[in-house]
Image: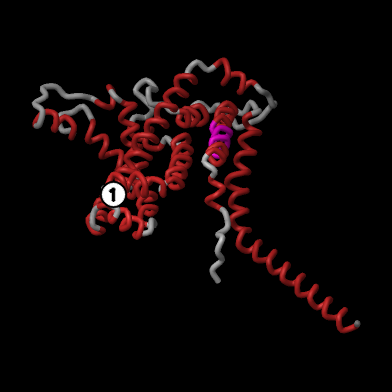
Amino acid sequence: MTAITEEVAVREKAMRAMRGRQRMNSIIFLGPATVIIVLFFLLPVIVDIVIAFSDMGRDLQISKFTTRNFERAATGDRRLPKVLFLTLIYVGATLAIFNVTFGLVLALTTTALPRGSGGFFRTIWLMPRMSPSVVYIVLWQWSVHSGDSSLVNQILKHVFGAQENIDLLSNSPVPLIILANGFIGASFGMIILTSAIRGIPDHLFYAARCDGAGSLAIVRHITLPALRWPLTYIGIWQTLSLMVSFEYIILLTGGGPFQDTTVFALYIYRRTFASGQYGYGAALALFLIIPGIIIALLAWRLTNMKELLQEPRIEVH
């Protein structure tokens, strides 16, 4: 009886030691990520909420807490509806035309080519993303400015015989910012989808060819179903990214002309830092944080992304 009791005690001690090691491993591996999330994600949100309910101005002082900032956003800011409508067009068009559709076309096209040729064209499309933002936008400005030396006007004159120059920066600023951001987003989608296509087992394509399937049938019945999760990920990630980004817009158009390309994130930036309305800017920022969380959770739910994170049914030791 004593031997059995001692054996049970030894097992309990070993189990406690194992659980202690598991907790320590969790702290070691998850601790740094947890600290980063708290410091750079959760804490800024809390600070933003506090400032949003304050009257903080250019002097960075808080004298009282109030809901006036939200009342102003709801009823007193006449520019806000136009900015929100432009943001909807900008995000929707860039996402649908370039980030998803054009990225998918690039992935399908380059994977259909020999590996060397496909890699070469993917490298070309990645160059805008690899180059500094300022260099990328300088090339766009050189291409579309209203002078005789712009790339667009040279093509129109020498190829199509046009007599007058066009100024896309002034006449078509919204399509221009969609194009400039779209090429960057398309390269991101291309890389993700190319990796997913390369991961499809080759025997599926061989079997389809043996059954007489053409290229379009293979894309429709084999490739596209396998890209469901990558396309969902690209849609969620790029939607959230487009909602909060304005780097290329402010470099290319400065939000003009006449604020025609001022998207919501740029509007918040200018209200906060250019006008010194920190409380109002923080309140507007909440309209980006909360919808972003809602969109991510809805997309997670509607697309059933939880299946993607399930543990494998077969353990490999």
| Image-based side of 7 in relation to 279, left or right | right
Q: Which residue is mark 1?
A: 213
Q: Nearer the viewer, residue 209 or 143?
A: 209
Coordinates of residue 132 in the picture (x, y in percent): 34, 46
- Counting labels gives 1
**Relative to 121, residue 240 above or below:** above
Can residue 72 be seen in this snapshot?
yes
In the rendered image, which quarter is residue 10 located in?
bottom right
Q: Nearer the viewer, residue 213 or 120?
A: 213
**Residue at the front extreme, as displayed:** 211
Q: Quadrant of the C terminus?
A: bottom right
Identify the residue shown where x is 38% and y is 34%: 96
Say which amino acid is labelled 1. Ala
Coordinates of residue 228 in the picture (x, y in percent): 44, 45
Q: Quadrant of the N terminus?
A: bottom right
Secondary structure at numbered mark 1:
loop
Identify the residue shown where x is 8% and y is 26%: 161
Stretch of the chain drawn in magenta:
288-296
Coordinates of residue 312 in the picture (x, y in percent): 55, 59
By secondary structure, the bulk of the magenta-drawn segment is best described as helix
